[in-house]
Image (cartoon, rainbow, N blue to C red):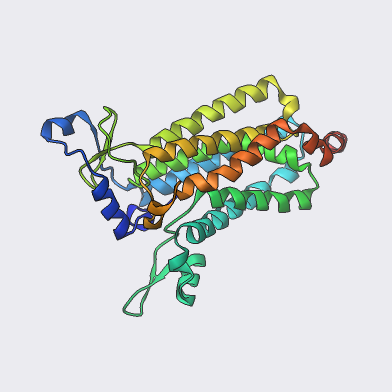
Amino acid sequence: MCRTATSCTSDSTYSLYAKSTTIKPNVMDTLAYIVWNPDLTAFMGMRWYSLCWLVGLLLAYLIVKRLYKEQKISPELFDPLFVYCFVGILIGSRLGHCLFYQPDYFLSSWQHVVEMIVPIRFMADGSVKFTGYEGLASHGGTLGLMVALWIYVRKTRLNIWRVLDNIAIATPTTACFIRLGNLMNSEIIGKVTDVPWAFIFERVDPMPRHPGQLYEALAYAVLFFIGWALYRKHPQKVGTGFFFGLCLTFIFTARFFIEYTKEIQEAFEASLPLDMGQLLSIPFIIVGLLCIFNRKLMERQGTEKQISKDNKSE
C-alpha cells in the first residue's frame, strides 16, 4: 500500500492507465458517478490516511485487550504487545514495498537504501527532504507482524497460536481502516469501468473507476464480524490456529480476486501473468488453509499442552 498516488505509481504506469482507458464519460455520465477529491487533511494538520491508521490500530488494541482479559491473560503480558505489533508492521510494510515493488530504485544506490529505511529523499540539488514513508505494502506488513509476534512469544512464553488467533480476530479492523485511508488518498485505484458505483478520482484522472480500496475495506469489515461471531460461539478454538488461518485465507483470497478490478501499481507488473499483489497472496492463502484444516500440525507444535500450561499460569 502506498501513501500517495504519486508515490505508488510511476509515470510509465500512468501511461498504462491511459492505454486501458476505453470509456470516455460525457457530462451526463459524470453526474451518475461518485466524484472523489476529498481534502487530504482531516483536522489540526493530520492527514486522513494517518488518522485511519491510528483508528484502525486503536480498535485492534482495544479488541485484543478485551480478548486477553476474557482469557485471563496477565495485563503485564498485554502491555508490550502493541509496541511489538506497531514496529513489526511498520518495518515489514516498508521493506515489503521497497523490495517487492520498487527494488530497481531502492537497491540502485546507497542513498536509495537510506531512503528505504529513513523517511527522507535525497533531491537532485543535493538537499534532503523529509517525506514520511511513501510506500507501505500489506504483504510485507503481515510478514513483519508475524516476526514481531514470534519475538513477543519468545519473551513472554505465551502460546504462539493463542497470540496469533487473538491478533487475527482484531486484524480486519486495522486492515479495513488502512484501505479507507487509501481511499481518502485516491490511491491504489481500480480499472476504468461503467458500473453505477464507480468513482472518479479527480486527483488521478477524469475516468470512472472501480473503488478497489472500498471493496477491500468492506471485505475486511465482513471478515471481522464473521470472526467475532465465531469467537463468541467457539471461544475454545482460540489457540488452535483456526482464527489465524481464517484471517489469512479470507483476507488474501479477497485481495487476490479484488486485484482483477485494480490498476497495477508498477509498470513491470504488466508483463506478469498475475500482478504482484496476487502472486504474494498465494503463499498466505496456502498457510491459512493449513492452519484451518491441519489440526495435527498444530498439535505437533505443542498447542494443546501449551494451552493447558497457559491456563494454569493465569
- Where is residue 32? Give x, y as percent: 20, 28
- Where is residue 108? Give x, y as percent: 46, 73
Q: Is residue 268 left or right of residue 313?
A: left
User: Is any part of residue 59 visible from this angle?
Assistant: no
- Where is residue 52? Give x, y as percent: 44, 43
Quarter holding residue 105: bottom left
- Residue at image x 40%, y 57%? 268
- Residue at image x 76%, y 37%? 73
What is the total number of numbered labels drawn onto the structure image? 0
Quarter holding residue 128: bottom left
Relative vertical location of residue 77 with respect to residue 233 in this rendering, above or below? below
- Residue at image x 26%, y 55%? 15
- Where is residue 192? Give x, y as percent: 27, 39
Q: Residue furthest left?
A: 27
Q: Residue furthest bottom?
A: 126
Tell me the quadrant of the picture where the C terminus can be found: top right
- Residue at image x 66%, y 22%? 232
Quarter holding residue 296: top right
Depth check, front residue: 37 or 113: 113
User: Is any part of residue 24 visible from this angle?
Assistant: yes
Relative vertical location of residue 216 with respect to residue 187 in this rendering, above or below? above
Depth check, front residue: 231 or 24: 24
Depth check, front residue: 140 or 88: 140
